[in-house]
Image (cartoon, grey):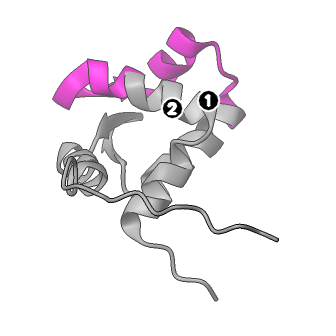
Amino acid sequence: MTVTSPPARALAALGHDARLSIFRLLVRAGDVGLRVGDIGAHLGLAPSTLAHHLSTLVDAGLVLQDKQGREVFNRVDFPAMHRVLGFLTSECCSGVTAQPAEDAA
């Protein structure tokens, strides 16, 4: 069994156009989040497709779901998002020297 790091799982989840669109919409919604039906209406996704993609984002630790009565609200886990961004930028501009490619011959 391969163990995947949290940043890798998050990036893999965001590697699908529909999930990236859902995530970006939820980022714009802020801490209030959006109901499942509202996400579907904004993006034109079928309920079963949307449920699958939301489940992947939840499993990756990027989206939190809160049940309020009969409605399920989805919101970005902003600390998790910032951890992924920190991982991507942690060594920004730290310097890497170019190594000449060795001849294949």
Q: Nearer the viewer, residue 13 or 47?
A: 13
Q: Nearer the viewer, residue 88 or 71?
A: 88
User: Main structural element of the magenta stretch: helix, strand or loop?
Assistant: helix
Tag shown at residue 20: 2
Residue 41 colored in magenta in the image: yes
Tag shown at residue 17: 1
Mark 2 in CB contact with mark 1 (< 8 angstroms):
yes
The picture quadrant where one finds residue 76 is top left
- Residue sitting at 44 percent across and 54 percent down? 10
Q: Left or right? Give the position of 94 relative to 41.
A: left
Q: Which residues are magenta?
A: 25-48
Amino acid carrying label 2: it is: Leu
Circle 1 crowding by C-alpha within 10 Å: few under 14, some 14–19, many from 20: few
The picture quadrant where one finds residue 35 is top left
Asked which secondary structure carries label 2, the reply is helix
Locate residue 7, reporting x and y percent: 38, 60
- Residue sitting at 77 percent across and 69 percent down? 104
Extreme residue in the bottom direction: 1
- Residue sitting at 48 percent across and 61 percent down? 9
Q: Say above or below: 20 vs 78.
A: above
Q: Left or right? Give the position of 38 relative to 52.
A: left
